[in-house]
Amino acid sequence: MMKLLHIAAFLMLVFTALEARPKLLGAKCKTGPLDIVFVIDSSRSVRPFEFETMRRFLIDIINNLEIGINATRVGVIQYSSQVQNVFSLKTFFNRADMEKAINSIVPLAQGTMTGLAIQYAMNVAFTTQEGARPLHKKIPRVAVIVTDGRPQDRVTDVAAQARAAGIEIYAVGVQRADMNSLRAMASPPLEEHVFLVESFDLIQQFGKQFQDKLCGVDMCTELDHGCQHTCVSIPSSFYCQCNSGYKLNADGKTCSMINYCNFGNHSCQHECVSILNGFYCRCRDGYTLQADGKSCQASDLCNSIEHGCEFKCVSTAGSYHCVCPEGQQLQADKKTCNKCKTGHVDLVLVIDGSKSVRPQNFELVKQFVNQIVDFLDVSPHGTRVGLVQYSSRVRTEFPLHQYMTAEDVKKAVQRVQYMEKGTMTGLALKHMLEHSFSEAEGARPLSQNVPRIGLVFTDGRSQDDISEWARRAKESGIVMFAVGVGKAVESELREIASEPVDQHFSYSADFNTMTHIVDNLKLNICPEEGKGETEFRNPCECEALVQFQSNTLAILEDLTEKLSQMTTRLEQLENQIAGKK
């Protein structure tokens, strides 16, 4: 509301300043702090004597404003085929300097690129760097566009962006100006922001018609009305009005949403939920709303409730249970699955972000990475995970010490942005060795005997040499896995992989068929501790047997329950038959 008062006061000053007679302004029209930028058309269609009239127009306005660093700040830009900053909001804080600068303007006398001028005003003139006050101070930002012709570029979209950025736009058209373009630029309501005069000679006479409208006594403006939604001014008084879907409370000022469920005609089988301007029916957990929008039917519980199963939910009659992937066991909470805990590793994944991968496939790569994270025990003293992306350059997405839970790692992976460009696999291996596995980035000291594992994922031939850095990585004690997809070169993958190569090298012809690679990595990436060396095998073979037994028992319990239900039903049928006899 204060913004509207300020702008209305400003426009009253603009228009009344242009009258032939001087006039003292009432207190209700006193201008408050504003950030104003005048956007002036100086195209070739504006004749020299017309531009002089516009020059006087600007000076007259400024002479009636309260100029100052803490009052109103003024900037001026002129445009034709290009945009020129005459002075910015931070340049001058007194009228004399502004008048001198306006008198020094040399018209550009070219085309009429109004859209370009609006873009400049939004991106440059109204920035804090150019003197605009920060938005949180709620100082109104006002752009006054004065033009005499049809724009030679598009103005609709850029003007909408400027308005969305908080800039109030007034469009003043003179003589040949296109009304449709003025309306496309101006802020709503258009009748208060669009002005058209017949000639530059009349630009100093058209302000009077707005004076009464802008400075008339509006009781909603003049008084502290206290209306929660809308104040409606009437002669010598006002009343409060609520938005659609709300009703006015007994205090005559505040509003509350209408509860349509209380009307008693909703016909919902389970629950009625009142919303703005209406209601909808909602079913209880375990039920699905039917096509009539009112009745409910029992549904698959796994698809209708927050079951919390980490891996998979299996529905049964009136209930459900959680299951885990093969090789993992359901924990005591009956929802989560155990992780590979037989050893801890420092794992750095190096993923190819080159142009050949393509954005949709890069999302599949991120899913692939998170599938690996799913079977790791990520913790400060367990497994640590780092991620590096490479193309023509290398970027550490996050180091080993940054995230200490699997959930945080997976969220960070989802935020990774695709790089594109080349495929410098050798450079990525060098970065991994020299930086990613350094203690500064979270790798544990070699004295702690925590295995270091590097997993390189690529879809094509490297554009630099990989031999030296692949060799150095393996000589430093890093166990290297190489995963290739599509056009990846097998010889390069084998050169990266540690011995035995067949256990450390995987390939998939397509990004959509990488699931089997994850299964292979499960068998090899978790080291067994306590044998004096790193041996790669399935850490969960014994647990798999236990899981098989658990799953079998669960199935038997389910069958027993169904059999009991069938027996009960048969007894009911027998009783019905006996009763008929």
Image: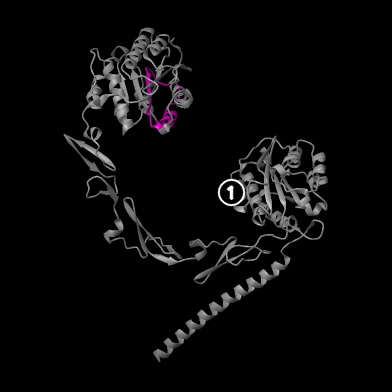
Instruction: Report which residue position mark 1 lands on.
Output: 411
Which residue is most to the top? 49
| Residue at 59 percent of width and 44 percent of height | 415
Which residue is most to the bottom? 581
Toward the viewer: 273 or 471? 471
Element type at marker 1?
A: helix
State which region is magenta. 137-166
**Relative to 250, 104 lies left or right:** right
Toward the viewer: 40 or 14? 14
**Relative to 411, 496 lies left or right:** right
- Return the x and y of residue 26 as percentages of the image width and height: 23, 23
Residue 144 colored magenta?
Answer: yes
Q: In this view, does 258 lie above or below 568?
A: above
- Return the x and y of residue 554 as percentages of the image width and height: 60, 73
- The quadrant of the image that shows the N terminus is top left
The answer to whether residue 507 is seen in the rendering is yes
Toward the viewer: 439 or 466? 439
Q: In this view, does 114 lie above or below 313?
A: above
**Relative to 365, 125 lies left or right:** left
The disc labelled 1 sits on which kind of residue? Lys
- Return the x and y of residue 205 as percentages of the image width and height: 26, 15
Toward the viewer: 572 or 56? 56
- The quadrant of the image that shows the C terminus is bottom left
**Relative to 521, 323 lies left or right:** left
Quadrant of the rendered image containing residue 441:
top right
How many numbered discs?
1
- Return the x and y of residue 541 as percentages of the image width and height: 73, 66
Q: Is residue 366 above or below residue 376?
A: above
Q: In this view, does 557 lie above or below 370?
A: below
| Residue at 40 percent of width and 12 percent of height | 97
The answer to whether residue 206 is seen in the rendering is no
